[in-house]
Image (cartoon, helix red, strand yellow):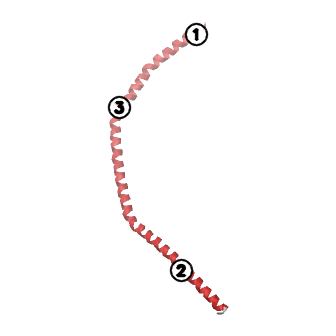
């Protein structure tokens, strides 16, 4: 066998090795793509479920907010009454506090003399 024959044989072996490696790699890629295809096929059903659940969640949230608003409307007069009582007590105690403060100041002046 001549050197040319040996070179051609080595090139052929290298070509076979490269072909086997490429076919193995492409086969693995095909398996990955099949997995992606299965995932993509299931996606519309999953998205439908997610959108349905999201719609139900929004409806429940609206109901809850409506109930809270109703209860706040019911309880609002109570807060106004408490505010009125607070204002009345402030108005009643302010003159007493001023009187007490003035009395204390006048007592200090009398003690300093």
**Direction from residue 8 to residue 43 in the image, left or right:** left
Q: Nearer the viewer, mark 3 or mark 1?
A: 3
Residue at x 52% of width, y 14% of height: 102
Label 2, secondary structure: give it: helix
x, y percentage for residue 16?
A: 56, 83
Question: Callout 1: few (<14), some (14-19), or many (20+) C-alpha neighbours within 10 Å?
Answer: few
Residue at x 62% of width, y 89% of height: 8
Residue for badge 3: 78
Sequence order check, earlier mark of 3 and 2: 2
Check residue 20 in the rendering and tell me which mark sits there, or answer none.
2
Question: Callout 3: few (<14), some (14-19), or many (20+) C-alpha neighbours within 10 Å?
Answer: few
Above or below, 1 against 84 in this view is below
Residue at x 34% of width, y 51% of height: 59
Above or below, 78 against 102 in this view is below
The residue nearer to you, when weighing 7 against 84, is 7
x, y percentage for residue 99?
A: 48, 14
Residue for badge 1: 109
């Amino acid at each position: 066998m001549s050197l040319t024959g040996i070179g051609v044989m080595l090139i052929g072996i290298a070509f076979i090795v490269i072909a086997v490696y490429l076919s193995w790699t492409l086969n693995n890629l095909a398996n990955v793509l099949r997995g992606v295809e299965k995932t993509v096929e299931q996606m519309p059903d999953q998205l439908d479920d997610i959108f349905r659940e999201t719609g139900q969640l929004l409806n429940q949230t609206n109901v809850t907010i409506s109930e809270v608003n109703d209860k706040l409307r019911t309880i609002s007069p109570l807060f106004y009454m408490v505010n009125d009582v607070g204002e009345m007590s402030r108005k009643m105690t302010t003159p007493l506090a001023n009187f007490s403060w003035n009395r204390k100041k006048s007592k200090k002046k009398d003690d300093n003399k």
